Image (cartoon, coloured by chain):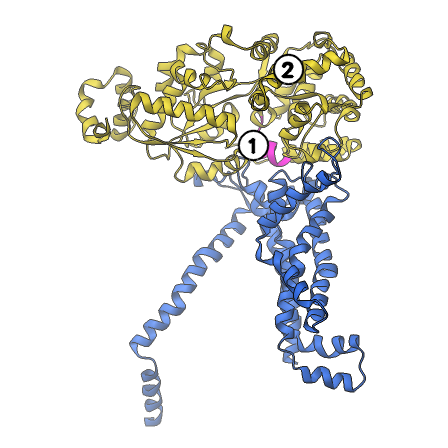
Amino acid sequence: MATSNQPSVRQSDLGFRLSRRELLVGAAGVAGAGALLAACGGGDEAVGPLSFGARTVDESPTKQLKALVAAYEAKTGNTVTYNATESNAFQNNLSQYLQGTPDDAFQWMAGYRMQFFAQQGLLVDLSDVWDKIGDQYEESYKIASTGLDGKQYFVPQSWYPWGLHFRKSMLAELGIDPDGVGTWDDFLKMLEGMKSKDLIGFAAADKGGWEAMGTFDIINARVNGYQYHVDLMAGREKWTDPRTAEVFTYWEQLIPYMNDNVLDLEWDGAMQLLLQRKAGAMLMGSWFGGNFKEQSDADYEDLWIIPFPEINPEHKRDTIDAPIDGFCAAKNGANNDGGADFLAFAGDMEGVQAMLDTGVPMTSANKGQDTSTYDAFQTQQLAVMGEAKYITQFLDRDTRPDFAGPVVGPAFQDWFRNPKDVTKILESLQAQWDALPPLT
Amino acid sequence: MIAAAGRTARRRRAFTRGDRLTLALFVGVPIAVHVALVWLPAIATILLSFTYWTGIRYTDITWAGLANYENILFSTPAFWDALRNNAIWVGWFGLIATPLGVLLAYEIDRQIRGHRFYQSAYYLPVVLSLAVTGIIWNFMLRPDGFVNGIMGRDISNAVSFFGNYDINIYVIMVIASWRHIGYIMLLYLAGLKSVDPAMREAAALDGATEWETFRKVILPTMRPVNIIIVVITIIESLRAFDIIYVIYGTSAGLPILGILVFQNIAGEGASMKGAAFAVILFLLSIGPIITYLRQQFREDVR
C-alpha cells in the first residue's frame, strides 16, 4: 500500500473517482489541489501518513485512542503518528498550535469552542465526512458539529452527563434512597445525613478555575430555567440581574457541606474524595468512570449518578450539561486529506467499536453502539440524559472564550474566598462582559 | 591643508574595507537580531495593547483606544489582587530574602564554623530552575503531598497551603526565597572576595565594631554589586511566573501580573487585554529600575 501514497497515483485515479459532490466542491472555487485532495477522501484508499494529536495523557483514554489508531492503521495501512499533550497545556496552546504545524487530526470539543476556530479558518471542512457517517448520528450531534457557516467541522466521539455522583454502597449505609433525592430539600437532607456521619457531603474543587462552573450552570438552569441560562451565556441577560444573584443563595447553602480546601483541589482531587469514601456526593461529568475502573471493577460498579435535584417546580429537572468530546482536522496540517480520512473512520461505528473493545467505559455518540451492551452505570447515564429536555455544553463551551476562562473562572474562585461579596463579584462580572471587544 | 589631508588619509587607512566589513558584521548582526527579536515584538505588543484582536487573523485587528487599559484598571479586580501580590513579593524579597542572602554571604566570607556546609546547602537550590522549584514544592505542600502526609492528613482535611488566600502568597514567598537567598548569597560572596582584607583590618584597628565595618567600609566598597542586587531583586519579583504557573496553572488561583499576561494572551481566550497587562508590567519593572540606576550613576559622576 505504501507506494499508493504517491500523488501521481492519486492523480491517475482522479478521472473516474470524481463524484458529483466533489465536482461541486471544485466548482465552488476550491483550488485545484483542494479538489484533488477532496476527491481522495475515501475511507478505503491510502491517503498517506498522518499525525494525530491527543489532548490527554491519562491512562484510560490513551488506551482507547491508541486502539482507534491501531484499528485505522490495520484497516488502511496508513501510518499514524500519535502525539499526546496534557489537556490544560493543549488547550492553552491551541491557537498557536493550529496556526503552526499542527497534527492532521486532533481531539477537541463541540459547540462554541469548535465554532470559534472554524470561523478563523483553522479547521478542515468535514461535510464530506458527514455525508458518509451522518446517518449514524442523531440530528442533535450534527448540529453540535456544525460551524456558524452551516458546514461540519467536528466528529463526535463521546458524551457525558453532569450529575450528582455517589457510591451506591455509601448511600445504602446511610439509609438514603437515591431515587428519593428529587428536590432541593431532599438534597440538603441527604447532605445533612452525610455530615452527621462526619463525611464531606458535597465534594468540590475549583483550583483549575473551571470545575465549579458546572455547579453554577446546573443551579442556574434549575432556578431560572434553560432559556435564562442560555441568554445569560450569550450576554442577553445580565449577571447583575437579581435572578443571577439568586443562584448564589442556593450555592451558598452547599458550602457547609463542602470540603474546606476547594481551591486546593482540581477535579481529580474531588474525585479522590469520592473514591476514598471521604465524601458522599459530587457534581461532575461522568467521564471519570474509567478512573474508578482503573482502581477496581468493584469501585466502578459502586458508582452511580442521578440528575441534580429540582429547585424551581417550573423547570423540574429539564436541563443538563452534557458536553460532547470528539475530533477536528487542522487546516494547517500537512495532510488534510489524511486527517479527514482518519476522522471518517473514527466517527464510523467500526472506529467506535475499536475504542469500545478496549473495555474502557464510553458512552459513544454513535447510534450504532448498542445500548443493550451498556453496563449499569452507562444505562443510568442514559436515563439521566433522557430526563432532560434541554442540553447545554458547559459554561466554558457555551460562552465566549475570552470571558469564560480569564473572567468567570477567577470570579467563582473569588466567590469561594468571600461568599458574602457576591454582589460585588457579579457587578464586576457584568462590567467585564460589557468591556469585551465586539465579536468580529 | 596638507596636514589635514594627511590626517584624513591616515584615518582612512586605520579602517580598511575589510575592517569596516568586520565591524559592520560584528555590530550590525547582533543589532539586527536584537531589534528583530526584542524591539519589534516589544513595540508590536505596545501597539497591540491599543487594539482588539484574537491573535489569529491580521485582518481582525481593530482599534480599541484605551479600552483595554480602562477594562484592567476599572473592571478587573484580579489586576488589583495581582498588584498586591507582586507588591508583597517585592517587599518580601527586598526586606527579608535579599538582606538574608547578604548576611549569609557576609558570614560565610568570614568563614564562620561550618561555612562550607552552609554555602553548599544554600547554593543548591540555585542550580534548579524556578519551574523545578515549583514542582518540588508542589509535591511537598499539595493536599496529597509529603508535608500533609507526615502530618497524618489526607486530602479531605489537608492543610490548605495553596488554596487559603490569607496565607498562600506567604507560602509562595518562602518557596521563592528558598532559591532567591542562595542566589543573592552567591552574587554577594563573589563581590566580597574582591574586597581588600587590609581595609577590614584597618577598620578593626580604628576600633570599628562589626556592624560599623560592614556599613561604612564593606557596603560602600561593594557598590557595583549592590546595584546589581537591587535590580535583580526588583526584576525577579515583578517577572515572577514559573513557580505560580507550575502550582496553579493559568487559573489565577494566585493572581500575579505575569500570570494575568499569560492568561489573557494564550489559549482560546486570547485578547489584547493580555498585551495591555504586559505593557503595565513592563512600565512597573522599568520605572523603578531606571530611577534607581540614574540616581546611582549621578552619584558616581559626582
B16 or A380, which is in the foreground?
A380
The chain ID associated with circle 1 is A
Q: Is residue B137 left or right of residue A110?
A: right
| Residue named by callout 2 | A302
Q: Secondary structure at mark 1?
A: helix
Residue drawn at point x = 40 percent, y = 69 percent:
B27
Q: Position of residue A126 (x, y in %)?
A: 38, 22
Farthest residue, direction bottom: B2
Q: Secondary structure at mark 2?
A: helix
Question: How dense is the environment of label 2, judged by Cα within 10 Å: few (below 14), some, or many (20 and up)?
Answer: some
Q: Residues within 10 Å of mark 1 (few under 14, many from 20)?
A: many
Q: For this rendering, which residue is in front, B246 or B197?
A: B197
A104 left or right, relative to A110: left
Of all chains in the rendering, the one displayed in blue is: B
Q: Quadrant of the N terminus of chain A?
A: top left
Q: Nearer the viewer, residue B294 or B220?
A: B220
The residue that appears at 80% across and 23% down in the rendered structure is A198
- Give the colour in which the image draws chain A: yellow
Q: Residue at x 39, y 16 (%)?
A: A348
Sequence-first disc among 2 and 1: 2
Q: Chain of mark 2?
A: A
The residue drawn where x is 35% and y is 85% is: B11
Kindly indicate whether the residues beneath marks 2 and 1 are on one polypeptide chain.
yes
In the rendered image, the vertical position of residue A355 relative to residue B203, given as above or below: above
Q: Main secondary structure of the magenta part?
A: helix
* Residue type at tag 2: Asp
Q: Which residues are magenta?
A: A399-407
Q: In the rendered structure, does residue A400 fall within the stretch colored magenta?
A: yes
